[in-house]
Amino acid sequence: MGETGKRMEQLGIALPVKDRRGTGAVDAVLTGDLLFLSAHLPVDAQGKAVYAGKVGVDLDVETAYKAARLCGLNMLATIKDYIGELDRVDCVVKALGLVNSGADFSSQPAVMNGFSDLMVEVFGRRGQHARSAMGAFALPQNVPIAVEAIVRVRR
């Protein structure tokens, strides 16, 4: 187990195991030293929404923060699947969070902190990234947030 895996173990962070059979979806594409990650949702191993609803209407910021963190856990599992060891992550370059927002909701960055805070917990300084957090009218399965990212990988 690498240093990142040991750190996660110390923090009590366990990655979900996702059944990717039959989905036809591509979760990531590695080109050069960049891993482009498709939008990850706050779903369980079977792909069912753990959190649902519009933030500011059906969910509060604290609950949506947890949903963003789950997006991050799912993304870490994808990264590990694609590159084998999380120690190969040189840095998280960029992240985009789309927040399923009520009409008057404007705290999308506070929701996205759930993802960003997890990346720093797991990777330390390597987890700091540029990011955008934007409101969305609707997201698949009515989830409160979807997060995509770009990660630089060590060879």
Image: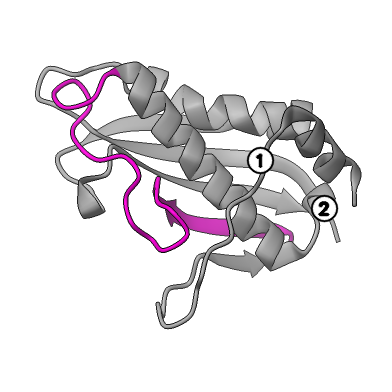
Height in image: 119 above or below 109? below
Q: Residue at x 50, y 73 (%)?
A: 20
Residue 59: give x, y in percent of width and height.
23, 25
Residue depicted at x 74% and y 59%: 33
Q: Is residue 131 left or right of residue 87?
A: left
Residue 60 appears left or right of 39: left
Is residue 126 visible to us here? no
Amino acid type of the residue that numbered disc 2 sits on in the rendered structure? Arg
Name the main secondary structure of what is drawn in magenta: loop
Nearest to the observer: residue 49 or residue 134: 49
Q: Amino acid at mark 1?
A: Val
Q: Label 1 to label 2, Cα distance in Å?
A: 11 Å
Q: Nearest the camera: 32 or 125?
A: 125
- Based on the picture, tell me whether residue 59 belongs to the magenta stretch: yes
Whole-percent x, y for residue 8 in the image: 76, 37
Q: Residue at x 40, y 51 (%)?
A: 43
Q: Which contiguous range is marked in magenta?
A: 32-60
Name the residue that disc number 2 marks: 88
Can you give x and y, in whole percent of width and height, for residue 4 in the image? 82, 41
Tag on residue 92?
1
Q: In this rendering, is residue 133 above or below 98?
A: above
Can residue 92 be seen here? yes
The numbered dot on residue 52 is none
Residue at disc 1, secondary structure: strand
